[in-house]
Structure formats: structure tokens, C-alpha cells
Amino acid sequence: MMSLLGFLPSLAQSLDVPGFNWKTLILGFSTAQYLFETYLSYRQYQVLKRETPPKALEGAVDDETFTKSQTYSRAKAKFGFFSSVYGYLMDTSFIIGDVLPKFWGFAGIALKMMPARFSGEITQSVLFFLGYNFVSTLLSLPLSIYSTFVLEEKFGFNKQTPSLFVTDFIKTQLLTIVIGTPLLSVFLKIILYFGNKFFYYLWLFTLAFQVVAIIVYPILIQPLFNKVTPLTEGKIKTEVENLASKLKFPLKDLFVIDGSKRSAHSNAYFYGLPWKKHIVIYDTLIDKFEPDEVVAVLAHELGHWALSHTTKMLLIQQIHLFTLFVSFAVFINNNSLYRSFGFFNEKPIMIGFILFNDILGPLNSVLSYGLSVLSRKHEYEADAFAVNLSYSKELSEALIKLHVQNLSTMDADWLYSSYHYSHPILPERLRAMGWKNEKKEE
């Protein structure tokens, strides 16, 4: 720790070059990433023009379903092209137009209207965060509305009503205020109080917050958006409980969530502390799938637990967070960085953290790619785990059904999928499981 504390100041000093134009560097990073990801999307769009399914899907997916999937995927891809351009132009205009110092100034004006006891950088940062987040949300709202009520509606997946959409929006904004305000305040207080050693204590705080969130989310937050009820007695519950017992999975509860309230898509997941886990199944999965197929899907999910995938990802996340906070310590007082973005007389920590994350854009992309590679490896392993439990046929058929009913992308450009996808595409998973179409053989 002491050697690290001694190294950071010298590194920080070497990176604080007077007159260095950090704005140009960040704009360059942003543009390069946008162009690269657009190129990948173009490659993928060419694949989405194919009219016949991959050989691995012959007999599993008919041409009509594959065509619908391709049409849906092209529609999402076109929307993705527009969203990317919109996001890039918005971010670029924010940087070129010096929006950050303007918002910080507005927060300062609002601060002067408040009682004296609320004065200081922390309160101004909270006001900045809430205002900046709200404006950014409003600017992206048209895209969300189009995605929900035009794109998803066209293909029969949207189940939200306008009133539910508005209610969700209001609840989300209120939660941002209720949770974001104290969270950001403590975040800044730790940095101000501990000085150069803040990264260690900040990491401990985020770790503690994650543990609290695991406990609090299903009790206080999830019920605000979805109804979660115990799974009724039946074949699914009996077989899942038996499977959990066999694997020594610390199952506490089996729940059904009303996912159909918003979407026709299906899913299942588990959460909880190491000694007490809860499994949640979407009602759409139960309604549209055979009991054995639902259990097979959960066998795959339990495979992630049995193979310690969640623990490994959590460990990687903690290493990443600690490294992130240590790296931020190098930039937190970088005068040239703040001056490049119009902050000549002050160095707000909140602003520094935003700019620091912009600098890390290319590195985050590389990290994201690495995590996607690891995630796909974990998916193959979880599939193999379910196969070893004799769920090969049921899991294969469940995956095919999921893709058919969700009109999920069934073919992909290798470079696009390796960069973007956390799961292997359907043909790859079926090949890995050795799936054979019994009807075709007959």
C-alpha cells in the first residue's frame, strides 16, 4: 500500500502536462469507438440479410420463423444505427459546447438559493448529478418510447401501456433521487476525508453497498415494478427443489415474476447471498414451455453457481473497481484535464470522475470484450453442466423455443458477436451440446 501511495503522485504529475488538450483526446477516443462499432454493426447487418438459417438449425427452425427473426433483428439494427448516431452527436455536442461547466454553474446558482447548512461541493455535486441525469434521460426518452411502442409493438413483444411506461419513468427518477443522493454524498465524502488513500475505502464502501443492494432490492425496489409470487406446487417446483437439493444449492425460495406485464420475452435467474439463494422464473417461461424445459433452463442457471461463475465474475468486478479507483487517484487533481473542459478555478471531484471515465473509454471497450469472451466460455460450461445432468434434449429444445418465441438473432458475424455478445449464438450452443434433430432423422 505504501509503495503504491508513493508511486501515484509521481505518475499524476507526469500526466498533468500544462496546455495538453484532453478534450481533443477524448473526442478522438469517442469518434474512434463510434466508427469501429458502426463498422461491426454494418458487418452484422449483412449477415441479417441472409434468407436461409445456418446448417446447424436445419429442421429446428423453419424458413418462415428464420425470416421473421432476421426481419426483427434488421429492424433493431436500423434502430441501433440511429441510436448510435444520436448518442454520438449528443455526447460530442456536450463536449464541444462545454455543457459540463454550464451545468456545474447552474448547480452553483441553485446552491445559493438553499439554506447555508447545505453549502459546499457535495451538495453542488448532488444538484449537478440530479439535473444532468434528468436532462440526459429526457434527451434519450424519445428513443425509449420508439423502441417500446413502435419497434417492440410491431413485432408483438410490447405489453406496456403508456400509463405503465410513465409510472415506471416517475418511479425510476424518484429512486435516482432517493438512492443516488446519499450514495453520491458518501462517495464524495470518502474522497474528501481520506485524501490520497481514498481508493481503498471507496472500494470497501462499494463492496458493502453491493451486499446491501442484494438484500434490499428484492424487498423494497423490485415490488415497485413487478409482482413476485411464490411458485405454486407442481412438477416444476418439485423437480427444481430436487435438483437444488442434489447440487446442494442453498435454495430459499422459488418465485414467479409477472414479466408479461411489460414484455413477451422469457427469462429466469437467481440471486441472493451465498447461504440463501432465490430463483425467479418469468411467467412467460412457465406459460410457453414444458415443465422439463423450464427445469433444464434452471439446470443451466444452477450450473453457473456450481461452477463458481458468479463468484469469478464478482471477483473480476472487484478487481476492476479497485483498479478504477486507484487510477482515478492519478487524475483527480489533474489541472490540465479540468482546464481543457472549462474548469479554470475549481476541480470538482464529480466532474473529474466523469472526465476520467471518458478517458478510459478505449480501455473499457477492451475490458468489455474480454468479459464477453469469458461470459461465452461460462455459457458453454453451464450448457455442458446441464447436459451432464441429462438435460441435453430438454435444454436444446428450450433454447430453440426461446429463440423462436423471442425472435432472437440466430446468425451473427463472428467479429460482431465476439465483441458484443455475452452468449454464444444458438447454432454454436447446439453444436457444442451435440444436438441432433430427431424429427429430421426420422
Image (cartoon, grey):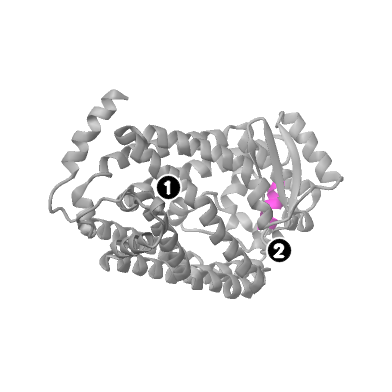
Query: Is 185 drawn above or below residue 241 in the view shown?
Result: below
Q: Position of residue 429 (x, y in %)?
A: 59, 47
- The answer to which of 384 and 29 lies nearer the viewer is 29
Q: Considering the numbered disc 2 on the image, is that residue within a helix, a strand or a loop? A: helix
Q: Which residue is mark 1?
A: 368
The residue positioned farthest toward the front in the image shown:
116
Q: Position of residue 48 (x, y in %)?
A: 51, 66
The answer to which of 279 and 47 lies nearer the viewer is: 279
The type of residue carrying mark 2 is Lys
| 398 is within the stretch colored magenta | yes
Let me know if residue 26 appears in the view: yes
Residue stretch rendered in magenta on the structure: 395-402
Callout 2 crowding tier (Cα within 10 Å): few <14, some 14–19, many ≥20: some
Q: In front: 283, or 190?
A: 190
Q: Nearer the viewer, residue 102 or 140?
A: 102
Q: Please report the residue visible at 24 percent of the width from the left and 59 percent of the height from the top.
A: 341
